[in-house]
Image: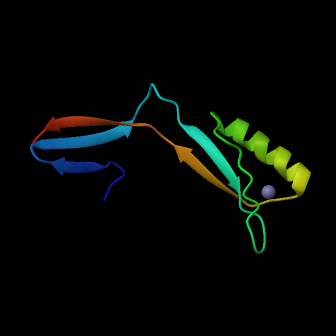
Amino acid sequence: MGTTTRYRFREYHVTTAPDPTALPTYQAVCITGDEHDCAATSGTTHTPEELTRWIAEHCAQTDHTSYEQTTHTILRAEPGNWQ
Ligand SMILES: [Zn+2]
């Protein structure tokens, strides 16, 4: 499997690609904690720098150092001809 995702449905050959007009969004959740994750969340941010700033502030306040990052990317499906 390559990095391009293809799925054949009925007579179409569909390729998905990131939508250049829709910017990705980033979110972080603090997963620091022994029995329970802290679970503080940055909410939706629009740049990695904004996300890092939130982490830096949260880390400064709590000394928490483990975070899970999620990136949301909008994809466009591009139907093509059956091949
Ligand atoms: Zn935390």
Camera-nearest residue between 24 and 36: 36
Displayed quadrant of residue 31? bottom right
* Residue lying at the far bottom of the rendered structure: 35
- Quarter of the rendering occupied by the C terminus: top left
Check the image and report above or below for 24 versus 60: above
- Quarter of the rendering occupied by the N terminus: bottom left
* Residue lying at the far right of the rendered structure: 61
Instruction: Report the residue at 44% width, 28% height from top.
Output: 20
Instruction: Report the residue at 78% width, 40% height from top.
Output: 53
Displayed quadrant of residue 38? bottom right
Q: Is residue 69 left or right of residue 36?
A: left
Query: Where residue 77 sits in the image (x, y, percent)?
Result: 29, 37
Camera-nearest residue between 5 and 44: 44
Query: Where residue 54 sits in the image (x, y, percent)?
Result: 77, 42
Displayed quadrant of residue 78? top left
Query: Where residue 4 sits in the image (x, y, percent)?
Result: 33, 48
Instruction: Report the residue at 63% width, 52% height from top.
Output: 69
Query: Where residue 51 sits in the image (x, y, percent)?
Result: 70, 41
Q: Is residue 50 left or right of residue 73?
A: right
Camera-nearest residue between 72 and 5: 72
Q: Is residue 77 left or right of residue 35?
A: left
